[in-house]
Amino acid sequence: MATNQGENQSLKRALKPIHLWAISVGMVISGQYFGWNYGFEQGGTIGLIIAAIFITIFYTAFIFSYSELSTSIPHAGGPSAYARKAMGPFAGFMTGMSVLIEFVFAPPAIAVATGAYINFLIPSINPVYATVAVFVFFILINMIGVKGAALIEMTATIIALIGLATYYAAGVSHVKWEYIVNSNAFPNGWTGVFMAMPFAIWFYLAVEGGAMAAEEVENPKKDIPKGFIAGIATLTLCTIGTLLITAGLGGGIGQPADNPLPEALVSVYGDTHFLPKLAAIIGLAGLIASLHGIIIGYSRQTFALSRAGYLPKFLSKLSKRQIPTWGLILPGAIGVIAAGNATFANQLIILAVFGAAMMYCLSLISLFVLRIKEPDLKRPFKVAYPWVPTLALILGLFSLFCVIYYSILGSTLPLFGLDVPLLIVLAVIYGGAIVYYFTVSKHKLLPIDQEFGVLDELDESGAEVGQNQGKDAGVEVIEQ
């Protein structure tokens, strides 16, 4: 692979399918513990359930399609790399910016909820201080190296899943059908379903982030589909349990909270019982898993965009532990400022969901273009083309429309004491990015054969891994 001025710009390959599953699920698992419940306010219990079914179908179709892209192009840039290879450098840049919007605004939303959970456990702690402290701490933790970070991610993810299982066990016998189906269960009709769509997406948002660790997976061609498919299956089961049990405990009634699971248990067991406290303590593991995982994701996306020349080169400089230090710190600083000044997480969720929906649609379009433009591209995993990606693209475009029309328009983000329209926030980000691209990045882009030279290295090293695994198992590996 070509390097920049002699510097090593290769990430360390140390991850197995279990790590990728942990990163993919861990990035999302906080979505089970908060955020989605704002959809009750928009669509009622039935409206949010319908939205969640719709989004589950979309994500299942999307993740199978995405597995084809990520195994064909196992690049740290993930979606930006797919779009550049399919549609050229500007499409790659705009897709990368959409990923950064998703991955920069999701962590402060998670950090706000983390502060709320800590405040629930220890009311004397100011939730804003807790929010900022946790965010900064996990930016620093990510500097230890990818394998250590992935181990922390896997541990936190498993604890979070145990926490959800405990919540289901504590709540299922107290579920009341009349809380789920009643006269207020569908208050805004189908409009409410469309308004609830961003919060249904939050159940799964960032599951695709594991692709940004593709260059750090030992055998990406085989391991990425295993990690992704196991991840989407895990999250689907969790979504069913979390949504139905919380709604059945009366969690869909009243003002949405940033800590809905403990509050739902309080309604059954009382605020002095140990179970709500236990749910809050374990819930912190879920929030930490997602915060930690998405920090991994945005740092790798920033690294890849910088290495390609889209962003300033200092953002792809690696530390001795092969960590993109500035790629961690700079987007993290933006997230910390947003988290420290946001009073509610729902506006941050909407911004993150918009970035995700844009990226999903651009990635799916890239898949279609590559099928036509590069029919001979190595595709170790092939989706059922064109039916599954067509379904995913139709549902993705409709989701994007719902996010823009029913959530972005008319919504504001409280920043520095001002209510800034979300549309203005997005216009400034994308407008500034486009100006930067045409004045700076366009003239500094790494040639496409050099940017994707990393894939040749991955092919070679992946083949070595496969040969070694075969020898260990006593199997002769035949080169084709």
Image: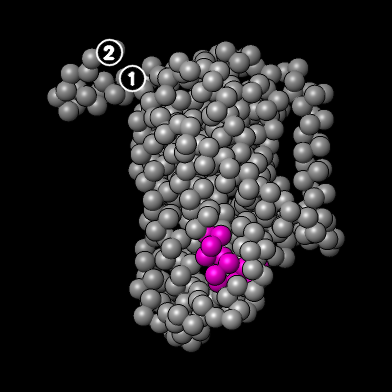
Labels 1, 2: front one: 2
Three-letter code for the amino acid on which mark 1 is drawn: Ala
Q: Is residue 127 above or below residue 366?
A: below
Circle 2 — which element? Answer: loop
Q: Is residue 412 above or below residue 146?
A: below
Q: x%, y% of residue 190?
A: 63, 64
Residue occupying image coordinates x 42% and y 60%: 238
Residue 219 visible in the picture: yes
- The mark nearer the N terminus, 1 or 2, is 1
Residue 144 visible in the picture: no
Residue occupying image coordinates x 61% and y 57%: 197
Q: x%, y% of residue 387?
A: 47, 36
44 drawn magenta: yes
16 drawn magenta: no
- Pointer 2: what residue? 479
* Residue placed most toward the observer, 157 or 336: 157
Please indicate whether residue 195 sits to the left or right of residue 274 in the image.
Answer: right
- Pointer 1: what residue? 463
Please indicate whether residue 336 sits to the left or right of residue 19 in the image.
Answer: right
What's the mark number on residue 265? none
Circle 1 — which element? Answer: helix
Quadrant housing residue 119: bottom right
Pointer 1 and pointer 2: residues touching (CB < 8 Å)?
A: yes
Q: Which residues are magenta?
A: 41-52
* Residue placed most toward the observer, 72 or 131: 72
Q: Is residue 140 above or below residue 340?
A: above
Quadrant housing residue 99: top right
Q: x%, y% of residue 164?
A: 41, 65
The residues tagged by marks 1 and 2 sit, at their Cα atoms, a distance apart of 9 Å
Instruction: Tell me how many marks there are.
Output: 2
